[in-house]
Image (cartoon, rainbow, N blue to C red):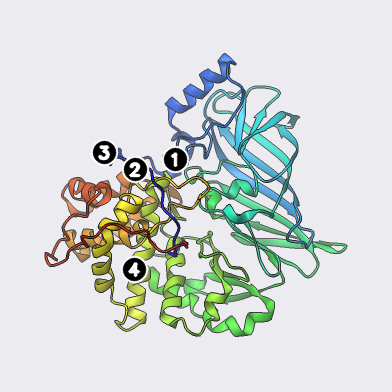
Amino acid sequence: MPFTSRRTASTDRQAPDLPRPSVPRRLKAHHRAVPAVLAVGALLAAGAPEPGPQGLGDRLYPHLGNPGYDVGAYDIAMKYSGRNDAPLDAVTTITARATGHLDRVNLDFARGSVRSVQVNGVPARYATHDEDLVVTPAHPVEPGRTMRIVVHHTSNPKGGKDGGWVRTGDGLAMANQADAAHRVFPGNDHPSDKADFTFRITAPRGITAVANGLPLGRSARGPATTWTYRSLHLMATELVQVSLGKSAVVRRPGPHGLPVRDVVPAADRRKLEPWLAKTPGQIAWLERQVGQYPFETYGVLLADATTGFELETQTLSLFEKHLFTLDRIPSWYVESLMVHELAHQWFGDSVSPRTWSDLWLNESHATWYEALYADHASKGKASMKERMKRAYQESDGWRADGGPPAAPKPPEKGQKIGIFRPVVYDGSALVLYALRERIGAADFDRLERAWYEQHRDGVASTADFVALASRIHGQDLSGFLRAWLYDTRTPPMPGHPDWHVKKEQAKPGPKGHSS
């Protein structure tokens, strides 16, 4: 999500010690934190507390996600009436493995009504508490057992200012970052629990439905059509995308036969075609930097909506259509934003953050390749070096305003995407610039490729990045990176003793954000 701004939080945090590297997500069935699971199991067995929100204890979003189980797959069926202000009927089926004894199962869910819940084919009791749906199975689920939870519910697109459904000029799209997927469907809404997804979207004739992954087919029955899509790679809930509208789906080949599909308002297809045609070349450019594109397809969704941001939803990045129709914006700048969201497919989508404090790993890399591409596309008018020098000058102010890159301040109440501040964009790309100056271009390029290769289709942490950088360089870089990632003041820039930070008081960044 590229930066356009949000207000900052007032809470400050001490810089923590670097945690130990985490287990690659490919071992997803075994990586759950045992203490949290045991604690939940003990509380449930005791039967003392009333059911309520659980949460994984994420430092920035404490009530997000749920302990005690690991989701393997979602099957989401939705029926759209053609009105983007009316609730959609939906059935969400969750297949998960219990990692602890479960008398109750918490799901993240809000902004919809629940009609029934089944667990392993048997009706289950349920209650809503804040933004949790608490399910009580007829029989407890023991550790290691698979459970199949079927929730019949509605999904309400109204009131979406804090994320979830985005109402467009001709339908709906999704913007689920950071913790808004549960405003669309029930689930374990935390990026550490990635899963497979299948979508079955029914819409009136004349409406095109598109979702993440590849199409499995469509079937018409009377005045409605059901479209089916499936992801071929694990995906975090925050990256889910479903587009409904009077859309054209434009297809073309990408590098090594990759299917590229773009989704645009049908009436604007011809006008937007010159922009769409740029995507295959951008994919090829990024592949030369970091390795082969990670997923089964890619494309852009140009929505007739005003969001204030763009978003890296997996295999189908969300953009505001007007970004491509304003003549006053330089083309190289628009292209660099396209590359930002594309870069996220490697950094943030394929390799997802273990916690939301690891967000800098997503945004620093996307900003890095955005800036590198802008330097190239603008023929030096947007110099990477000058951009990083300006970022260095502002860095102390950004850290005071939003926290250090790897320890961002929590969002203010009512500002769920308030963690997207300047420090996680250029302020975090500055960390990569300092690292490259410290270890040299050759080691840095090896690190970028190795980071993706070792953690693709998984989740990873700041500690994992520090450990890999040290291994690639052959020297312990933990002290160097700890200062850049956690100090409240910006360290000296290697190789640039003439660079200085501004002395004046920190000022809030511009308002808005884009991922």
Question: Spatial distance from mark 4 to mark 3, Cα to Cα?
Answer: 31 Å
Discs 4/3, front? 3
User: Within the image, what quadrant is residue 451 found in?
Assistant: bottom left
Near mark 4 (Cα within 10 A), the count class, few <14, some 14-19 or many ≥20, is some
Near mark 3 (Cα within 10 A), the count class, few <14, some 14-19 or many ≥20, is few
Residue at 61% in and 62% down: 214
User: Which residue carries the number 1 mark?
Assistant: 27
Chain-order first, disc 3 or disc 1: 3
Q: Is mark 1 on a helix, strand or loop?
A: helix
Discs 2/4, front? 2
Residue lying at the far front of the rendered structure: 505
Residue at 60% in and 55% down: 161
Q: Are marks 1 and 4 in contact (CB under 8 Å)?
A: no
Discs 1/4, front? 4
Camera sees residue 189: yes
Against 181, is 310 above or below? Answer: below
User: Which residue carries the number 4 mark?
Assistant: 289
User: Which residue carries the number 3 mark?
Assistant: 17
Question: Spatial distance from mark 2 to mark 4, Cα to Cα?
Answer: 36 Å
Chain-order first, disc 1 or disc 2: 2
User: Which residue carries the number 2 mark?
Assistant: 12
Question: Spatial distance from mark 3 to mark 1, Cα to Cα?
Answer: 25 Å
Discs 3/1, front? 3
Residue sitting nearer the eye, 316 or 7: 7
Q: What amino acid is labelled 4 in the image?
A: Gln
Against 66, is 110 above or below? Answer: below
Q: What amino acid is labelled 1 in the image?
A: Leu
Q: Is mark 4 on a helix, strand or loop?
A: helix
